Image (cartoon, rainbow, N blue to C red):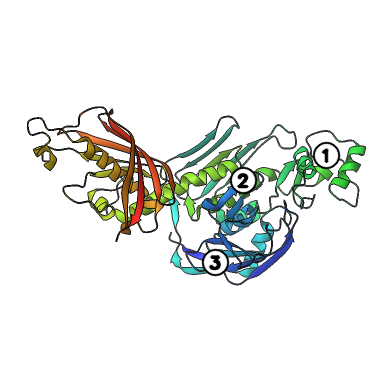
Amino acid sequence: MLKNQRTIGKEVTIEGTGLHTGVKTRMTFKPSPAGSGYWFERTDIDGNPRIKADIDHVTDISRGTTITQGEVKVHTVEHVLSALAGLEIDNCVVELDGIEPPVVDGSSRPFVDALLEAGIVEQDAPKEYLEINKTLIFHDEEKGVDLVIVPSDEFRITYMVDYRNPALGTQYTSMYSLQEEYKDEFSEARTFAFLSEIEELKRVGLIKGASLETGLVIEDRDLDEEELDRLKEVFDMKGALKPSENGLLDNRPLRFYNEPVRHKVVDLIGDFALLGISIRGHVMAARAGHESHVEMVRKMRKIYQARKLTKKYQRTQSTSYVFDIEAIKRILPHRYPFLLVDRILELVPGEMVSGIKNVTANEPFFQGHFPDRPIMPGVLIIEAMGQVGGVLMLNETENPEDSLVYFTKLDNVKFRRMVVPGDTLYMRVELIYFRRGICKMQASAYVDDELAAQAEMQAVIRERE
């Protein structure tokens, strides 16, 4: 069923203290136009600068998710974004008079309640989705992390954590419906940390806003009365700390029997909101966290960017290639007899592109090179690789149709075999770097899996005059 985008009906404010910075913050959710996405606005800085909450602005995931633009930062955005995405709100401005949203009780529920108080309004624009049509995998052998997304008609999550601690052990949860389950079954789950971690962070001056009211503290060692008295001062408690019967400091009760893993789902939804659109796929996570969540979003972002380009230039969709010759002609300025790419097979924006050139006996250059033994000139193989590389630059400039890519330097050029009529030249170009309109690419050309030519190419992008 098609859905429209949504925002909130009015402004709503919530106040509190930031978990890591300890800064008192006033935060206001504000309606935003369709297609605008999520923005954080710092009203405590001259000019009220805004940061778009997307994967391109993530700069730190060590103890939460931090976004940065220039000198402006916002720490620990994941719970706020989780509340917005969990309620399927697509567009919102989050106004802050400090560097970090309030932690409140360590869950996303206070933000959910505030947003529901503001009301949710449907907008006159269709909601956009990234359909996961093939399995995506993130694996970290050293940390034992696995994060997989498989095709599904709906957004679903299966999450497992495995801690060597009696209070946690192995925990598992599943969410099959964001609309039906997020608010009451997940948003109330609080953040958690081990006691030894918190003590060390407090010792070095971090998590200044943390208390036993802002999350769960898991005991990872036996505590006697003397140490309980010491911890009372660490957490600035007026009353005595209760001995634990459930493995949680002060014997705090759980809201769910598997509250920690449910909070992992809250974090994942918040981190996945950095994609900028909703997904349709089944996420399966084991021992994951902010780092793996963000890396998976980066993978999805590249797929989304490639599909946007395909949708823009390719009239007939195909599962076997990205751009046909008609689409290539809409992208590149070259024409007969100098258009040397017939099809783009694969495109990962910002990383690599591959394409083919079918070499036939009718190529005009064979008339002179050489009439009795036709061989494709090496300079034209380089040109063909360069044209494939030009497609890779599509996502690196705002107006690709108004730009031209000029070679400025070639290094390590080598020719390994002759290319003759009947050959299919397969070309792969990988981006080494792109800065200030200058790019460097590594290009290779093959015939039947045999290397025909290779080169390092440097080019500059300029507007057409």
Write down the residue under mark 1. Answer: 245
Q: Quadrant of the rendered structure where residue 412 is?
A: top left
Which residue corresponds to the image point at 77% horizontal and 51% vertical from the top-left? 208
Label of residue 7 in the image = 3
> Which structural element holds mark 2?
loop
Extreme residue toward the bottom, this view? 10
Q: Which residue is mark 2?
A: 61
C-alpha distance separating marks 2 and 1: 33 Å
Mark 3 secondary-structure assignment: strand
Q: Earlier in the sequence, mark 2 or mark 1?
A: 2
Q: Earlier in the sequence, mark 3 or mark 1?
A: 3
Residues 143 and 339: in front is 339
The reply, left or right, for residue 111 in relation to residue 293 is right
Looking at the image, which residue sits at the far front?
408
Q: Is residue 76 left or right of residue 362?
A: right
Q: Which sits earlier in the primary sequence, circle 3 or circle 2? A: 3
Marks 3/1: CA–CA distance: 44 Å
Q: Amino acid at mark 3?
A: Thr
Number of other residues with Cα within 10 Å of mark 1, as a class: few under 14, some 14 to 19, many 20 or more: few
Answer above or below: position of 461 versus 42.
Answer: above
* 404 is higher (above) or lower (below) than 454: below
Q: Position of residue 27 (x, y in %)?
A: 67, 64
Secondary structure of the residue carrying tag 1 is loop
What residue is at 56 percent from the left and 54 percent from the top? 178
Residue in view at x 47 percent, y 44 percent = 299
- Using the rendered image of the protein, determine whether residue 432 is visible from the camera's viewpoint: yes
